[in-house]
Image (spheres, rainbow, N blue to C red):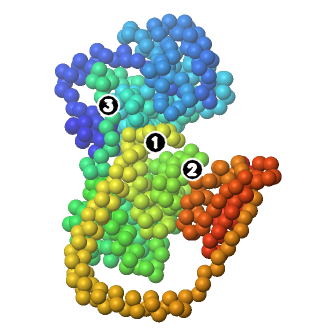
Amino acid sequence: MSQDRGFDQGLSGQSSQSLSHQQDQKGLNQFSIDFFIEKRFITQEDLKSILEDVRCLYNIQTIKLNPQNQIPGLDGTAFSIIDHDENKLNARCDAVNKILQLIEQRNKQKLEIFMLIPEGTVSTVIGTQGKQIESIKLETKAHLVVNQPIYEFQLRTVTILGESSRIFNAFKLIIKQLQERGISNEDYAKKAEPLDPKRVMTKAKFAFLSVIIEYILKNRELEKKYSVRLKGKGINDIKIKKNKLRKDEGILQIDGTLFNVQEAISNIIKKVTQQFKKNEFDIRIVMPSNFASKLIGAKGCQIKELANKARGAQIKVLSDKDDSDIVQDCLVQVSGSMENKQEATILILEQIECFKNGGPILESGKYINENFAQQYKNSVQIQDMKQKRHQSSSSDSNRRQRSRSSNKRQKYLKRSRSSSSSKHKPKQQVLKTKIIVKQSIIQQMHKQLVRFCSDLNVKIKTLPSDIGQEAVVKISGDFRGCISVIQYILNEQCKLSKR
C-alpha cells in the first residue's frame, strides 16, 4: 500500500514491507520513548528534578528534557527516555510509571499526557478501522486518541487521559505493539501528508424529509455532473436512536471523493432551497457518535470556530452525553441562510474525514488540513464565476442588439423629462452649523469622518477654539446629511471617551 493511499483510508500511510525489511526493523526495537506534558500539570523545573531522580533510581542511560519535541502552540515540556540496552525496555517502562505517579501526586487530579510516536507507526497503533485503539481503550479505561498531524511537527501525538495507572497501562500496550512490529529510521523520516479531498473516498449521509429525497433522486444529472452516487436509505440503515428522526424523514447517502461530495451537497442545498421555498429546512448530517465531543471541542471552541468560518451558521450536535460507542450515529444540525448551510456542511464533512485519522489536538494553531476548506471554497467560486461570465457573455450580445434600437428613444425621452421635471424640483434644504469637540477626539476619527462626509456630500472644516483643547467643527451641506454627520461625531465621541 502506498503512503498516499494510506491517507485516503483515513489512516497515516504505512508502506508494505518485505520480510527481510521487517527483520531489519526488529534490531531497532530500542527506540526513544518520548512524551509531552502541558505546564498546567507540572512546571519545567519540577519535571526536571523528577526525571533526574527517576533516572538514578532505575539506572537508565538518559532521561532528559527534549526541546526538539516541543509541540507548536502548546505551553509545556517534552522529555525523552533513552537507553540502547535491549534488556532495559522493562526498566524504561517502570521509569515511565514512576514519573506518572510522581506527577499525579503533585496534582491530585487526572492527567493528560501526549505520547509522541513516529509518523510511520500511526497505522499500527490505530489498527484496521480503528479496532486496535478501541481495544486499548476498552482494556485500560483510559481516554485515548491518535491526533491529527500538526503543521511542521514531525512526530504524531497520542493523547492519553486518565489516572496515572490507566495512562501507564495504555502506554504499555502501545509499546508492546511497537516492539512487536519494530521501528526503523524510515518510520521517523516519514512525514504526514495533508488529507486530499480530491482523493479521499467518503460516504456522506444526510437526514432529509422523504419528499426532498424523492426530488433529489429524480435529478440524476447530479450524479454525472459531480461523479457521485446518490442512494436513498431508510431510517433502519443507520444506527441512531429513533427519537432523533421524524417519521417522514429518510436518509440520503452520497458516495464519491470528498471534494465531489462537497460540490454535490452544495448544489443540492441550492436546488432544494429554490424548490421548497415555503418550507424552511435544516441540513442534518449523520456522523459517528464518538466524533461528537471532538466536533464540539473544549468548551465548544471547535464548533464555534466552524460556525464563524461559515459566517455565523448555527451548528448543533444532536447527541446524548453517553454516546461514545463507535458503532452508534448522531446528527449534526446546520441552520441559517442557504450560503451558511453550504459553507458549514462543507467544513463539517471535511472535519469528519479528519476525525477518522484522529481529529484535532490544539484549540488554536495550524493543522495540516486547516486550509483545504478555503481552497475548495475558492475553487468553487472561480468555477461559478467562469460559468456566470460564459452565460453573461452569450446573453450580452443579444441584449446589446435589443437595446441599441431603444437607446435613441430613451435618450430623447430622458431629455424631455429632465427639462420638464427640473422646473418642479423642490429646493434642497441647506444647513450651516458648527459644534465644539475635543481636538484629540477629532484627530483620532479624522480619516473616518472625512470619508463619512464625502459619502453624504457634506463639507466640514475644523478650526481651533478659544476654549483650551477644544476644536470648532463647521458643517455645511444637505440638512439630513449634516444631521447624520453630527450624530456620527457624537457617537464616536462617546465610544472614544469610554476607551
As measured in the structure, the alpha-carbon distance from the residue carrying label 3 to the one carrying label 2 is 30 Å
The residue closer to the viewer here, 86 or 284, is 284
Residue at the spot 41% in from the left edge and 70% down from the top edge: 208
Task: Tell me if residue 177 can be seen.
Answer: no
Task: Give the quadrant of the N terminus.
Answer: top left
Label located before the other in sequence (3 or 2): 3
Q: Answer few, some or many: residues within 10 Å of disc 2's Cα (few below 14, many 20 plus, some between 14 and 19).
A: few
Q: Name the amino acid type tagged 3.
A: Lys
Percent x, y for residue 180?
Answer: 33, 24
Identify the residue position indicated by label 2 in the image: 300
Identify the residue position indicated by label 3 in the image: 191
Residue at the spot 47% in from the left edge and 29% down from the top edge: 71
Q: Quick one: SS at disc 3?
A: loop
Percent x, y for residue 486?
Answer: 69, 65
Asked where in the image residue 348 lies, by quadrant, the reply is bottom left
**Which label is found at residue 360?**
1
Q: Quick one: SS at disc 1?
A: loop
The residue closer to the viewer here, 458 or 36, is 458
Q: Name the amino acid type tagged 1.
A: Pro
As measured in the structure, the alpha-carbon distance from the residue carrying label 2 to the one carrying label 1 is 13 Å
Percent x, y for residue 239?
Answer: 42, 59
